Amino acid sequence: MATTVPKTMKALVKTKEGSSFEYKDVPVPEPKDDEVLLKVDAISVCGSDISLYMWNEVARVIATVPFIPGHECAGTVVKCGPKADIAVGTKVGVENHYFCGNCYQCRNDCREICKNMGQFGHGKKTEHGACSEYTIVSAKYLYQLTRNLNADQIAMLEPLGVAHNAVERLDVKGEDALIIGCGPVGLLAGMVAKAEGAKRLIGADIDPNRLELAKKVGFDVTVNTKEKDLKEFVMEFTEGDGFGRVCECSGAPVMVNASFSLLRKGGTMVMVGLPKQPLHVENVLQDIVFKALTLRTVHGRRIFHTWRNTEALVADGKVDVNALISHRFPMSKFEDAFQVLFSGKGCKIVLYPSE
């Protein structure tokens, strides 16, 4: 079915270094070769988008001006380039890690950590992002939905995929699992861990609101680390052994440094959070070498294995991503949305470009 596409559209644009974005009219791009023009149905705001808004040190590492932000999105195909084999009307999610297909990692099924990776919504090898009424994406980076999910759920598959990738590497079935950091990805990791058969799920954070939400989405025990020493709690809870599975989602250097001491011998830890300072482990022999532990890290999703798994988890009702969406705004009210995030009162916020 043909769709009428306008000549211009509203978009958020970062045209120069500095805080915030410009909300302005820009031309609707024309798809070429294997590109696909998407009508953007919803965008969920990521922690990295906060860095891009503020244009802090992290932003200067991960982004290149100019660009349109937004990478956690749901879209509908409205037009295709001559080499794109995808039907108009198809509902899609966007794999924002733009892999080259030629490097060692891509040739060995590790496209999510491509050596030459570009990033949708960050200005890395593309100026396009999802904070616009329409966007351009190569068909090879699109995940075509096979189940009946709404736009909010599709947009949440990207962050859910990061959590799924982490939990899959932990192998939590039948194990107690400790999630350090109950922000959106930590909460999603806990929800995936429960769905994948974790025995007991423990969440640690300093924010009582996050801990309350953790309880609502299925965590068995929560620990406020401002009020209780985490290592003391862990040793009491595990009778001195430590946890066999630890998922570090806070990125706080002090917590990352301490995480190794919370593992039992032979345990596994996965790092998801992004520490901004050097790490220092006080007791390397006792807490790392002599434990014969396994340390894994993740960057994004396994393409497209993770997308298939997260779509099924949401479609089958095993993970309720809507439980983490605290606010919804028209994209024109993006300043209000970011102020909610800065206030600490929001969890996941969804924007709608056409509103």
Image: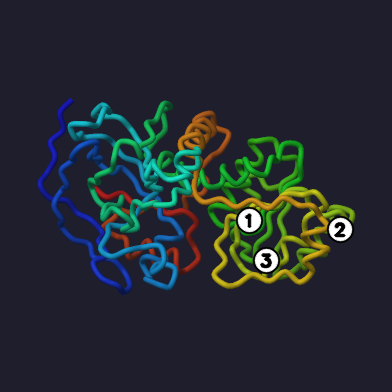
Amino acid bearing label 3: Met
Q: Position of residue 117 (x, y in %)?
A: 39, 51
Circle 2 residue? 236
Q: Which residue is mark 3?
A: 255
Q: CA distance from mark 2 to mark 3?
A: 18 Å
Viewer-side residue, 209 vs 126: 126
Asked whether, in this view, residue 327 is left or right of residue 164, the answer is left
Measured as percent of width and height from the top left, residue 24 is found at: 18, 61
Please rate how many residues cluster around mark 1, counting C-alpha atoms within 10 Å: few if below 14, some from 14 to 19, many from 20.
Answer: few
Residue occupying the point 68% across, 71% down: 280
Camera-side residue of 209 and 127? 127
Say which residue appears at 67% left-offset and 44% top-offset: 170
Task: Quadrant for residue 136, please give it.
Answer: top left
Earlier in the chain: of badge 2 and badge 3, it is: 2
Quadrant, the N terminus: top left
Using a 10 Å C-alpha cutoff, classify the residue at mark 2 as few (fewer than 14 neighbours), some (14 to 19) or many (20 or more): few
Q: Nearer the viewer, residue 104 or 325?
A: 104
Separation of disc 1 and disc 2 at Cα? 22 Å
Residue 51 image point, x, y percent? 41, 66
Query: Residue 89: which numbered mark, if any?
Result: none
